[in-house]
Image (cartoon, helix red, strand yellow):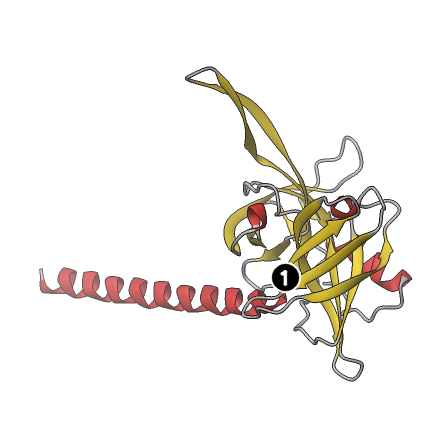
Amino acid sequence: MRLALGVAVLTLLATGCASSGSLTTRDEVIRKILPSTVQLRCEREGGGRRSASGVVVASDAVTRRSWIVTARHFLEPPTTQQIHLTAPGRKDRTKLVVVASSPDADVTLLVAEGIVLPAVNLKEIAKLGDDVWVLAFPWGRRLTVVGGVVSQISADAGDDAFEGPARMIDASVSYGASGGGVFDARTGELIGIIESYRTARVGTTPPQVIEVPVPGETTLVSSSAIVRLMKSSDVPAEAPK
């Protein structure tokens, strides 16, 4: 009986230690990627306003510049507009200028002058089922952290890929999350940004139809597409993993 009790106590202690270590690691990862997540707003000619999310992918302390990626559709169709970012912990707004947009992926690169923000590391290869964190500003409001897994990998038609550039995650998002970062939950490396999400039309009582995000149908722009855009714009980038 004493032996069994001792084993049970040791097992409980070991489990507690493992849990504590895991929580510490999770906390460190989230704190690491928070400063690289920014909120974007634009005021378009004619009075239109939009909001989105973005990720800092490069910075230069000498020239005091930071480069940010977001979803290209946030700024379409092209028109006269003022774009600003707000970083966590900062109340001031910083003006952004478009550097380049990808011709074949829903991603745009912008630059902010006079501000140096910590840049993320990029990771090109993900695996089905990898845990991820999504950091974004849904509905243009407060920063939100959502957990999920990689639910689809980019592949040629007919291929069932197990690893490669991430294409979908199962985390539900909403308006304003476009351009938000999708990070490997274990390392904090960026595997992509939010491109879009599919919704289902659901009837309610009294008669009304609402659009509900479909889990597993949140699509990404992979980090490999981001790296290609950065290289074509001569922006320094870490070699993706």
Task: Look at 72% across and 53% down and name the residue there.
Answer: 42
Q: Residue 221 in the image: x percent, y percent?
A: 73, 48
Number of callouts: 1
Q: Quadrant of the N terminus?
A: bottom left
Res 158 quadrant in image: top right
Which residue has dot 1 on it?
38
In the rendered structure, which amino acid carries the disc numbered 1? Val
Closest to the observer: 193 or 48? 48
Which residue of the protein is positioned furthest toward the front in this rendering?
46
In the rendered image, which quarter contains the C terminus? bottom right
Up/down of 41 relative to 237, above or below: above
Residue 69: image x %, image y %?
74, 58
Query: Viewed as shown, does residue 2 lie left or right of 164?
Result: left
**Residue sticking out furthest to the top:** 207
179 or 21, which lies in front? 179
Residue at 54 percent across and 40 percent down: it is: 172
Please say whether residue 130 is visible from this viewpoint. no
* Residue 220, percent from left and from top: 69, 45
Left or right for 43, reference 86: right
| Residue at 89% in and 63% down | 233
Taking depth in this image into account, of 221 and 5 the one nearest to the observer is: 221
What residue appears at the point 62 percent right and 69 percent down from the top-left corner?
Answer: 92
Locate residue 128 relative to residue 18 in the image: left or right. Answer: right
Q: In this view, does 57 lie above or below 167?
A: below
In the displayed structure, would residue 133 be above or below residue 91? Answer: above
Q: In which quarter of the image is residue 8?
A: bottom left
Residue 129 lies, in percent from the top left, at 56, 46
Q: Which residue lies furthest to the left in this view?
A: 1
**Label 1 secondary element:** strand
Crowding at label 1, few (<14), some or many (≥20) Cα neighbours within 10 Å? many
